[in-house]
Protein backbone atom coordinates (compact mmCIF):
# COMPACT_ATOMS: atom_id res chain seq x y z
CA UNK A 1 0.00 0.00 0.00
CA UNK A 2 1.12 3.56 -0.67
CA UNK A 3 1.88 5.62 2.42
CA UNK A 4 0.08 8.85 3.30
CA UNK A 5 2.26 11.96 3.86
CA UNK A 6 2.29 13.83 7.16
CA UNK A 7 -0.79 15.92 6.37
CA UNK A 8 -3.61 14.32 8.34
CA UNK A 9 -7.33 13.91 7.83
CA UNK A 10 -9.28 17.07 8.71
CA UNK A 11 -12.70 15.49 9.19
CA UNK A 12 -13.06 17.13 12.62
CA UNK A 13 -13.46 20.50 10.87
CA UNK A 14 -16.57 19.30 9.02
CA UNK A 15 -20.03 18.15 10.02
CA UNK A 16 -19.82 14.66 8.50
CA UNK A 17 -21.65 12.16 10.74
CA UNK A 18 -20.00 8.94 11.80
CA UNK A 19 -20.96 6.22 9.36
CA UNK A 20 -21.13 8.53 6.31
CA UNK A 21 -18.47 7.92 3.65
CA UNK A 22 -18.52 10.99 1.43
CA UNK A 23 -16.23 10.55 -1.57
CA UNK A 24 -17.96 13.00 -3.86
CA UNK A 25 -16.19 16.37 -3.64
CA UNK A 26 -16.23 16.58 -7.45
CA UNK A 27 -20.02 16.87 -7.17
CA UNK A 28 -20.13 19.29 -4.24
CA UNK A 29 -18.05 19.64 -1.11
CA UNK A 30 -19.26 20.34 2.39
CA UNK A 31 -18.20 23.63 3.93
CA UNK A 32 -16.26 23.96 7.16
CA UNK A 33 -18.25 24.09 10.40
CA UNK A 34 -16.61 27.43 11.13
CA UNK A 35 -17.51 28.71 7.67
CA UNK A 36 -21.14 27.75 8.27
CA UNK A 37 -21.09 29.73 11.50
CA UNK A 38 -19.64 32.75 9.69
CA UNK A 39 -22.34 32.43 7.06
CA UNK A 40 -25.07 32.29 9.70
CA UNK A 41 -23.64 35.39 11.33
CA UNK A 42 -23.64 37.15 7.98
CA UNK A 43 -27.28 36.24 7.34
CA UNK A 44 -28.19 37.51 10.81
CA UNK A 45 -26.34 40.77 10.14
CA UNK A 46 -28.69 41.47 7.23
CA UNK A 47 -31.49 41.70 9.79
CA UNK A 48 -29.68 44.81 11.05
CA UNK A 49 -28.61 46.56 7.84
CA UNK A 50 -27.52 49.66 9.72
CA UNK A 51 -24.54 47.58 10.83
CA UNK A 52 -23.43 47.06 7.22
CA UNK A 53 -20.96 49.83 6.40
CA UNK A 54 -19.32 51.03 3.21
CA UNK A 55 -16.16 49.06 4.02
CA UNK A 56 -18.24 45.85 3.94
CA UNK A 57 -18.84 46.41 0.22
CA UNK A 58 -15.13 46.40 -0.57
CA UNK A 59 -12.82 44.95 2.07
CA UNK A 60 -14.12 41.32 2.21
CA UNK A 61 -14.33 40.73 -1.57
CA UNK A 62 -10.91 42.33 -2.01
CA UNK A 63 -9.61 39.92 0.63
CA UNK A 64 -11.18 36.97 -1.21
CA UNK A 65 -9.55 38.02 -4.48
CA UNK A 66 -6.18 38.41 -2.77
CA UNK A 67 -6.43 34.89 -1.31
CA UNK A 68 -7.27 33.48 -4.73
CA UNK A 69 -4.35 35.39 -6.24
CA UNK A 70 -2.02 33.88 -3.64
CA UNK A 71 -3.22 30.41 -4.57
CA UNK A 72 -2.42 30.86 -8.27
CA UNK A 73 0.67 33.08 -8.10
CA UNK A 74 -1.08 36.21 -9.38
CA UNK A 75 -1.57 39.76 -8.16
CA UNK A 76 -4.78 40.53 -6.29
CA UNK A 77 -5.74 43.07 -8.93
CA UNK A 78 -5.78 40.33 -11.60
CA UNK A 79 -8.73 38.54 -9.98
CA UNK A 80 -12.45 39.39 -10.04
CA UNK A 81 -15.49 37.84 -8.35
CA UNK A 82 -17.99 36.01 -10.55
CA UNK A 83 -21.08 33.87 -9.80
CA UNK A 84 -20.37 30.85 -12.01
CA UNK A 85 -18.12 29.20 -14.56
CA UNK A 86 -20.55 30.06 -17.36
CA UNK A 87 -20.22 33.75 -16.44
CA UNK A 88 -16.43 33.53 -16.60
CA UNK A 89 -16.40 31.68 -19.92
CA UNK A 90 -18.83 34.21 -21.39
CA UNK A 91 -16.50 36.97 -20.21
CA UNK A 92 -13.57 35.31 -21.95
CA UNK A 93 -15.56 34.80 -25.14
CA UNK A 94 -16.52 38.47 -25.18
CA UNK A 95 -12.88 39.55 -25.01
CA UNK A 96 -11.10 37.14 -27.34
CA UNK A 97 -10.90 37.54 -31.13
CA UNK A 98 -12.15 34.84 -33.47
CA UNK A 99 -11.97 35.00 -37.26
CA UNK A 100 -13.96 33.15 -39.87
CA UNK A 101 -12.57 29.66 -40.39
CA UNK A 102 -10.53 29.59 -37.16
CA UNK A 103 -10.77 26.83 -34.56
CA UNK A 104 -11.68 26.58 -30.89
CA UNK A 105 -10.27 23.42 -29.31
CA UNK A 106 -12.09 21.56 -26.51
CA UNK A 107 -11.89 18.08 -24.99
CA UNK A 108 -14.39 15.29 -25.53
CA UNK A 109 -17.03 15.20 -22.79
CA UNK A 110 -15.84 18.54 -21.43
CA UNK A 111 -18.19 20.15 -18.90
CA UNK A 112 -21.08 21.92 -20.72
CA UNK A 113 -20.42 25.39 -19.27
CA UNK A 114 -17.09 25.32 -21.10
CA UNK A 115 -18.69 24.11 -24.35
CA UNK A 116 -21.93 25.97 -25.06
CA UNK A 117 -20.43 29.50 -25.14
CA UNK A 118 -17.79 28.37 -27.64
CA UNK A 119 -20.39 26.70 -29.85
CA UNK A 120 -22.39 29.93 -29.97
CA UNK A 121 -19.28 32.01 -30.58
CA UNK A 122 -18.14 29.74 -33.41
CA UNK A 123 -21.59 29.88 -34.99
CA UNK A 124 -21.62 33.69 -34.88
CA UNK A 125 -18.16 33.96 -36.47
CA UNK A 126 -18.39 31.08 -38.95
CA UNK A 127 -15.63 29.33 -37.04
CA UNK A 128 -15.35 25.73 -35.84
CA UNK A 129 -15.30 23.97 -32.49
CA UNK A 130 -12.90 21.02 -32.74
CA UNK A 131 -13.24 18.28 -30.15
CA UNK A 132 -10.19 16.27 -29.08
CA UNK A 133 -11.17 12.60 -28.81
CA UNK A 134 -10.65 10.83 -25.50
CA UNK A 135 -7.25 9.09 -25.68
CA UNK A 136 -7.15 5.41 -24.81
CA UNK A 137 -4.24 5.90 -22.39
CA UNK A 138 -5.83 8.91 -20.63
CA UNK A 139 -3.11 11.29 -21.81
CA UNK A 140 -4.91 14.31 -23.26
CA UNK A 141 -1.83 16.49 -23.59
CA UNK A 142 -0.30 14.99 -26.73
CA UNK A 143 -3.45 15.00 -28.89
CA UNK A 144 -4.41 18.47 -27.69
CA UNK A 145 -0.99 19.96 -28.42
CA UNK A 146 -0.87 18.22 -31.80
CA UNK A 147 -4.16 19.89 -32.75
CA UNK A 148 -2.97 23.44 -31.94
CA UNK A 149 -1.81 25.23 -35.08
CA UNK A 150 -1.82 28.67 -36.70
CA UNK A 151 -5.58 28.36 -37.33
CA UNK A 152 -6.32 27.86 -33.65
CA UNK A 153 -7.81 30.94 -32.00
CA UNK A 154 -8.73 29.54 -28.58
CA UNK A 155 -7.86 26.50 -26.51
CA UNK A 156 -10.48 25.91 -23.80
CA UNK A 157 -9.76 23.09 -21.38
CA UNK A 158 -9.50 21.96 -17.75
CA UNK A 159 -6.50 20.76 -15.76
CA UNK A 160 -8.28 17.56 -14.66
CA UNK A 161 -11.19 16.14 -16.65
CA UNK A 162 -14.37 16.31 -14.59
CA UNK A 163 -15.48 12.75 -15.38
CA UNK A 164 -12.42 10.82 -14.21
CA UNK A 165 -9.59 13.16 -13.24
CA UNK A 166 -7.47 12.46 -16.33
CA UNK A 167 -4.80 15.14 -16.68
CA UNK A 168 -3.80 17.91 -19.04
CA UNK A 169 -0.24 19.28 -18.82
CA UNK A 170 -1.16 22.96 -18.80
CA UNK A 171 2.43 24.22 -18.88
CA UNK A 172 3.03 22.38 -22.14
CA UNK A 173 -0.35 23.37 -23.59
CA UNK A 174 0.27 27.01 -22.68
CA UNK A 175 3.66 26.96 -24.39
CA UNK A 176 2.24 25.46 -27.59
CA UNK A 177 -0.75 27.81 -27.58
CA UNK A 178 1.45 30.91 -27.27
CA UNK A 179 3.77 29.67 -30.01
CA UNK A 180 0.77 29.50 -32.35
CA UNK A 181 -0.88 32.75 -31.26
CA UNK A 182 -3.82 30.96 -29.60
CA UNK A 183 -5.55 32.16 -26.45
CA UNK A 184 -5.83 29.79 -23.47
CA UNK A 185 -9.00 29.68 -21.34
CA UNK A 186 -9.03 27.37 -18.32
CA UNK A 187 -11.85 26.02 -16.16
CA UNK A 188 -10.06 24.81 -13.03
CA UNK A 189 -13.16 24.03 -10.97
CA UNK A 190 -12.17 20.34 -10.70
CA UNK A 191 -8.54 20.88 -9.75
CA UNK A 192 -7.62 24.24 -8.22
CA UNK A 193 -6.31 23.95 -4.68
CA UNK A 194 -5.75 20.22 -5.12
CA UNK A 195 -3.03 20.40 -7.78
CA UNK A 196 -0.16 22.87 -8.11
CA UNK A 197 -0.96 25.61 -10.60
CA UNK A 198 0.63 28.98 -11.30
CA UNK A 199 -0.38 31.58 -13.85
CA UNK A 200 3.31 32.44 -14.09
CA UNK A 201 4.07 28.97 -15.44
CA UNK A 202 0.99 28.51 -17.64
CA UNK A 203 0.16 32.10 -18.66
CA UNK A 204 -3.55 31.63 -19.43
CA UNK A 205 -5.60 34.47 -20.86
CA UNK A 206 -8.47 33.65 -18.50
CA UNK A 207 -8.70 31.21 -15.60
CA UNK A 208 -12.14 30.50 -14.13
CA UNK A 209 -13.06 28.57 -11.00
CA UNK A 210 -16.21 27.92 -8.98
CA UNK A 211 -15.73 27.48 -5.22
CA UNK A 212 -18.42 24.95 -4.29
CA UNK A 213 -16.39 21.83 -5.07
CA UNK A 214 -12.71 21.50 -4.20
CA UNK A 215 -12.34 25.01 -2.75
CA UNK A 216 -14.80 24.09 0.03
CA UNK A 217 -16.78 27.25 -0.61
CA UNK A 218 -20.36 28.31 -1.31
CA UNK A 219 -22.47 27.74 -4.38
CA UNK A 220 -22.94 30.73 -6.74
CA UNK A 221 -19.49 32.09 -5.97
CA UNK A 222 -16.30 31.97 -8.02
CA UNK A 223 -13.34 33.84 -9.43
CA UNK A 224 -11.87 34.80 -12.77
CA UNK A 225 -8.21 35.52 -13.32
CA UNK A 226 -7.74 37.96 -16.19
CA UNK A 227 -4.24 38.24 -17.62
CA UNK A 228 -2.97 41.84 -17.50
CA UNK A 229 -2.96 41.99 -21.31
CA UNK A 230 -6.78 41.86 -21.16
CA UNK A 231 -7.36 44.37 -18.36
CA UNK A 232 -8.63 46.93 -20.86
CA UNK A 233 -11.35 44.59 -22.11
CA UNK A 234 -15.13 44.71 -21.93
CA UNK A 235 -17.06 43.56 -18.85
CA UNK A 236 -20.31 41.61 -19.07
CA UNK A 237 -22.05 44.11 -16.81
CA UNK A 238 -21.86 47.85 -16.28
CA UNK A 239 -22.36 47.90 -12.53
CA UNK A 240 -21.72 50.91 -10.36
CA UNK A 241 -19.18 49.15 -8.16
CA UNK A 242 -16.88 48.47 -11.12
CA UNK A 243 -16.43 52.17 -11.81
CA UNK A 244 -13.68 54.41 -10.48
CA UNK A 245 -14.51 56.12 -7.22
CA UNK A 246 -17.40 53.82 -6.30
CA UNK A 247 -16.17 53.80 -2.69
CA UNK A 248 -17.60 57.33 -2.31
CA UNK A 249 -21.35 56.69 -2.02
CA UNK A 250 -22.08 60.41 -1.82
CA UNK A 251 -20.80 60.94 -5.38
CA UNK A 252 -22.12 57.89 -7.25
CA UNK A 253 -24.14 60.10 -9.60
CA UNK A 254 -20.97 61.82 -10.71
CA UNK A 255 -20.93 59.21 -13.44
CA UNK A 256 -17.45 57.97 -14.20
CA UNK A 257 -16.23 56.87 -17.63
CA UNK A 258 -13.28 55.06 -16.02
CA UNK A 259 -13.37 51.64 -14.40
CA UNK A 260 -11.74 50.33 -11.26
CA UNK A 261 -8.08 49.47 -11.97
CA UNK A 262 -6.73 46.16 -13.25
CA UNK A 263 -9.41 43.43 -13.45
CA UNK A 264 -11.85 45.45 -11.34
CA UNK A 265 -14.13 46.11 -14.31
CA UNK A 266 -14.87 42.39 -14.65
CA UNK A 267 -16.47 41.93 -11.23
CA UNK A 268 -20.07 40.76 -11.21
CA UNK A 269 -22.81 43.04 -9.95
CA UNK A 270 -23.26 42.82 -6.16
CA UNK A 271 -19.80 41.26 -5.89
CA UNK A 272 -19.78 42.20 -2.19
CA UNK A 273 -22.15 39.27 -1.47
CA UNK A 274 -22.19 39.81 2.28
CA UNK A 275 -23.49 36.31 3.07
CA UNK A 276 -21.27 34.14 0.85
CA UNK A 277 -17.98 36.02 0.88
CA UNK A 278 -17.07 35.16 4.51
CA UNK A 279 -17.58 31.46 3.73
CA UNK A 280 -15.29 31.67 0.70
CA UNK A 281 -12.65 33.63 2.63
CA UNK A 282 -12.50 31.11 5.48
CA UNK A 283 -12.08 28.21 3.07
CA UNK A 284 -9.36 29.91 1.05
CA UNK A 285 -7.48 30.86 4.20
CA UNK A 286 -7.43 27.24 5.34
CA UNK A 287 -6.44 25.87 1.92
CA UNK A 288 -3.65 28.43 1.56
CA UNK A 289 -2.47 27.68 5.08
CA UNK A 290 -2.19 23.97 4.32
CA UNK A 291 -0.74 24.49 0.86
CA UNK A 292 -1.55 22.70 -2.37
CA UNK A 293 1.54 20.49 -2.21
CA UNK A 294 0.56 19.03 1.18
CA UNK A 295 -3.06 18.49 0.16
CA UNK A 296 -2.06 16.96 -3.16
CA UNK A 297 0.37 14.59 -1.48
CA UNK A 298 -2.21 13.45 1.04
CA UNK A 299 -4.94 12.85 -1.54
CA UNK A 300 -2.53 11.15 -3.91
CA UNK A 301 -1.92 8.57 -1.18
CA UNK A 302 -5.66 7.92 -0.98
CA UNK A 303 -6.18 7.66 -4.74
CA UNK A 304 -3.20 5.30 -5.00
CA UNK A 305 -4.94 3.07 -2.47
CA UNK A 306 -8.19 3.34 -4.39
CA UNK A 307 -6.46 2.43 -7.65
CA UNK A 308 -4.74 -0.58 -6.08
CA UNK A 309 -7.98 -1.88 -4.58
CA UNK A 310 -9.89 -1.29 -7.82
CA UNK A 311 -7.40 -3.24 -9.91
CA UNK A 312 -7.54 -6.09 -7.42
CA UNK A 313 -11.27 -6.58 -8.06
CA UNK A 314 -11.00 -6.32 -11.83
CA UNK A 315 -11.82 -2.66 -12.41
CA UNK A 316 -9.80 -0.41 -14.69
CA UNK A 317 -8.18 2.88 -13.67
CA UNK A 318 -6.02 5.38 -15.52
CA UNK A 319 -2.27 5.05 -15.19
CA UNK A 320 -0.92 7.17 -12.32
CA UNK A 321 1.04 9.34 -14.76
CA UNK A 322 -2.19 10.45 -16.43
CA UNK A 323 -4.56 10.87 -13.48
CA UNK A 324 -4.98 13.63 -10.94
CA UNK A 325 -4.09 13.11 -7.27
CA UNK A 326 -7.61 13.79 -6.00
CA UNK A 327 -10.06 12.41 -8.56
CA UNK A 328 -10.17 8.93 -10.04
CA UNK A 329 -12.53 6.96 -12.26
CA UNK A 330 -13.19 3.26 -11.67
CA UNK A 331 -14.16 1.76 -15.03
CA UNK A 332 -16.52 -1.19 -15.29
CA UNK A 333 -16.41 -3.39 -18.38
CA UNK A 334 -19.87 -3.06 -19.89
CA UNK A 335 -20.84 -0.09 -17.73
CA UNK A 336 -21.61 0.54 -14.07
CA UNK A 337 -24.15 -1.99 -12.73
CA UNK A 338 -27.55 -0.30 -12.58
CA UNK A 339 -28.24 -0.88 -8.90
CA UNK A 340 -24.75 -0.12 -7.61
CA UNK A 341 -25.04 3.54 -6.63
CA UNK A 342 -28.34 2.90 -4.82
CA UNK A 343 -26.68 0.02 -2.98
CA UNK A 344 -23.76 2.23 -1.97
CA UNK A 345 -26.09 5.02 -0.85
CA UNK A 346 -27.96 2.53 1.38
CA UNK A 347 -24.63 1.93 3.08
CA UNK A 348 -24.12 5.71 3.30
CA UNK A 349 -21.33 5.69 0.74
CA UNK A 350 -21.57 8.52 -1.75
CA UNK A 351 -19.85 8.68 -5.14
CA UNK A 352 -20.95 9.71 -8.65
CA UNK A 353 -21.44 7.77 -11.87
CA UNK A 354 -20.00 9.35 -14.99
CA UNK A 355 -20.31 7.28 -18.15
CA UNK A 356 -18.97 3.76 -17.56
CA UNK A 357 -17.12 4.82 -14.41
CA UNK A 358 -17.66 5.47 -10.76
CA UNK A 359 -16.02 8.80 -10.04
CA UNK A 360 -14.35 8.75 -6.63
CA UNK A 361 -13.37 12.15 -5.29
CA UNK A 362 -11.76 12.24 -1.81
CA UNK A 363 -10.95 15.48 -0.01
CA UNK A 364 -9.17 16.47 3.19
CA UNK A 365 -11.98 15.00 5.33
CA UNK A 366 -11.40 11.47 3.96
CA UNK A 367 -8.98 8.80 5.14
CA UNK A 368 -8.05 5.12 4.72
CA UNK A 369 -11.20 4.05 6.58
CA UNK A 370 -13.34 5.64 3.86
CA UNK A 371 -11.41 3.74 1.19
CA UNK A 372 -11.98 0.50 3.12
CA UNK A 373 -15.71 1.25 3.46
CA UNK A 374 -16.03 1.82 -0.29
CA UNK A 375 -14.26 -1.38 -1.30
CA UNK A 376 -15.88 -3.49 1.33
CA UNK A 377 -19.21 -2.49 -0.21
CA UNK A 378 -18.00 -2.98 -3.79
CA UNK A 379 -16.65 -6.44 -2.97
CA UNK A 380 -19.94 -7.41 -1.33
CA UNK A 381 -21.92 -6.16 -4.33
CA UNK A 382 -19.75 -7.67 -7.02
Image: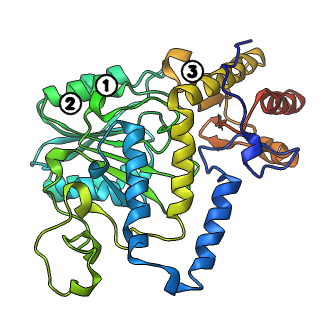
The residue pinned by badge 1 equals 171
Dot 2: few (<14), some (14–19), or many (≥20) neighbours within 10 Å? Answer: many
Marks 2 and 1, Cα distance to the nearest angstrom? 10 Å
Asked which quadrant contains residue 271, the reply is: bottom left
294 on left or right of 71: right
| Residue 12 seen in the figure | yes
Tag 1, which secondary structure? helix
Colour option used:
rainbow
Residue at 45% of width from left, 41% of height from top?
109
Q: From the viewer's perspective, is residue 245 above or below residue 75?
A: below
The residue lying toward the viewer, choosing from 355 and 18, is 18
Q: Nearer the viewer, mark 3 or mark 1?
A: 1
The residue pinned by badge 3 equals 318
Q: From the viewer's perspective, is residue 78 above or below residue 175?
A: below
The residue pinned by badge 2 equals 177
| Residue 164 seen in the figure | no
Marks 3 and 2, Cα distance to the nearest angstrom? 26 Å
Marks 3 and 1, Cα distance to the nearest angstrom? 21 Å
Dot 3: few (<14), some (14–19), or many (≥20) neighbours within 10 Å? Answer: many
Amino acid sequence: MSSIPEFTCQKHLFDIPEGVTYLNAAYMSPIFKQAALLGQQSVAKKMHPWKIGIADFFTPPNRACQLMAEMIGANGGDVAVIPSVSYGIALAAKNLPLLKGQKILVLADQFPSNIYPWQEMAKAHQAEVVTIARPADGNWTGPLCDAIDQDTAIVACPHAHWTDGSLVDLVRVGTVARANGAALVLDLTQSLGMMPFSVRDVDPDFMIVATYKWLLGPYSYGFVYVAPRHHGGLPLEEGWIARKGSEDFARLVDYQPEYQPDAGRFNMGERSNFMLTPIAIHALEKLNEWGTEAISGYLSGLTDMIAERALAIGLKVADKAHRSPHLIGLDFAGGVPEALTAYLAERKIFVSVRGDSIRVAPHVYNDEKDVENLFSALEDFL
